[in-house]
Image: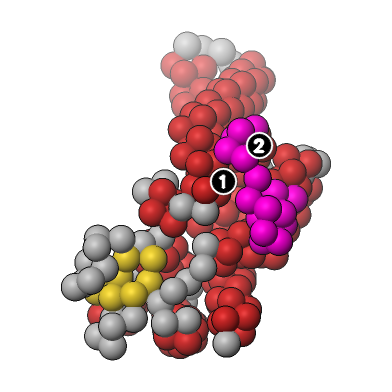
């Protein structure tokens, strides 16, 4: 999902107050015209959440979020990341897993670690890595565009069968078999590759409460994966875009609430 010109302009106004690498940020954050500095991970996360919402809702959300960033003086504690995952992202993903035949157990393990971290016990890097790899594998399994891939594989198989005179009945049998086998294998490879590539970097950031390391782990990409995991179904039903916008809205609302809690605690 990409921004309309209006959405892009609205968000540029939001980020005009968080201009990247302003004086005194040391390259590690974004500074507003009023001198409020936000950590570097916040901008890609906010950008992804803004981009996924309808223009009016996104603009209202940006004003609300910027107000909380100002209340915090830009000093957004890393605990916001844990709180957001604990209260918003992971409950949504557990429910999505259950709808797609999973147990959500891998995700619940990570949720427990976020709960510990939010309470002041960050856990070790090895604990996070051991929990994140299977959890991210499940996230990316859910985020894979299974319905589209299955439809493409089916069409390709039918074309091959027709070109080789399989006959109508054998063509449908071959198409169903090939599409299931091919799409399943591709979905597993997609999930495995992303989980292996990302789990170690995120584990180090979480264990050390390292905002810069988290920023370097492409946190905006996780926002997109979470929203797709919520929106995707095994069969296309025409509601994917609507579900995706709702997922971005839910994630955005959750981040705003996490910022509000942090600002209230800091007051």
Q: Give the image location of residue 264, x and y in percent.
A: 61, 84
Q: Give the image location of residue 7, x and y in percent.
A: 34, 77
**Is 5 left or right of 117, judged from the image as shown?**
left
Q: Most extreme residue toward the left, as rendered?
A: 23
Say if the magenta span includes residue 129. yes
Q: CA distance from mark 1 to mark 2?
A: 9 Å
Q: Are marks 1 and 2 in contact (CB under 8 Å)?
A: yes
Q: How many marks?
A: 2
Which mark is first along the chain, 2 or 1? Answer: 2
The residue to which callout 1 is attached is: 207
Q: Residue at x 57, y 81 (%)?
A: 266
Colour mapping used in the image: secondary structure
The residue to which callout 2 is attached is: 127
Q: Secondary structure at mark 1?
A: helix
Q: Is residue 187 above or below residue 164?
A: below
Q: Residue at x 61, y 33 (%)?
A: 126
- One can see residue 112 in this view: yes
């Amino acid at each position: 999902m990409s921004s309309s010109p209006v959405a892009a302009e609205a968000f540029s106004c939001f980020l005009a107050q968080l201009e990247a690498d302003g004086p005194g940020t040391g390259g590690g954050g974004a500074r507003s015209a009023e001198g409020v500095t936000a950590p570097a991970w916040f901008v890609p996360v906010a950008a992804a959440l803004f981009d996924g919402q309808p223009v009016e809702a996104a603009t209202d959300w940006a004003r609300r979020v910027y107000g909380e960033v100002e209340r915090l003086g830009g000093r957004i504690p890393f605990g916001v990341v844990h709180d957001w995952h604990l209260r918003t992202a992971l409950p949504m993903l557990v429910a999505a897993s259950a709808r797609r035949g999973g147990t959500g157990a891998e995700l619940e393990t990570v949720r427990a670690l976020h709960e510990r971290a939010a309470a002041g016990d960050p856990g070790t890097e090895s604990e996070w890595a051991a929990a994140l790899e299977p959890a991210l594998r499940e996230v990316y399994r859910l985020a894979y565009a299974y319905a589209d891939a299955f439809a493409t594989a089916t069409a390709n198989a039918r074309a091959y069968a027709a070109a080789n005179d399989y006959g109508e009945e054998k063509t449908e049998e071959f198409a169903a078999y090939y599409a299931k086998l091919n799409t399943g294998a591709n979905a597993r490879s997609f999930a495995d590759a992303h989980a292996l590539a990302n789990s170690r970097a995120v584990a180090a950031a979480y264990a050390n409460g390292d905002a810069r390391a988290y920023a370097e782990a492409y946190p905006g990409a996780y926002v997109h994966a979470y929203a797709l995991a919520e929106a995707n179904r095994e069969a296309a039903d025409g509601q994917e875009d609507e579900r995706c916008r709702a997922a971005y809205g839910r994630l955005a609302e959750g981040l705003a609430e996490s910022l509000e809690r942090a600002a209230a605690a800091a007051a």
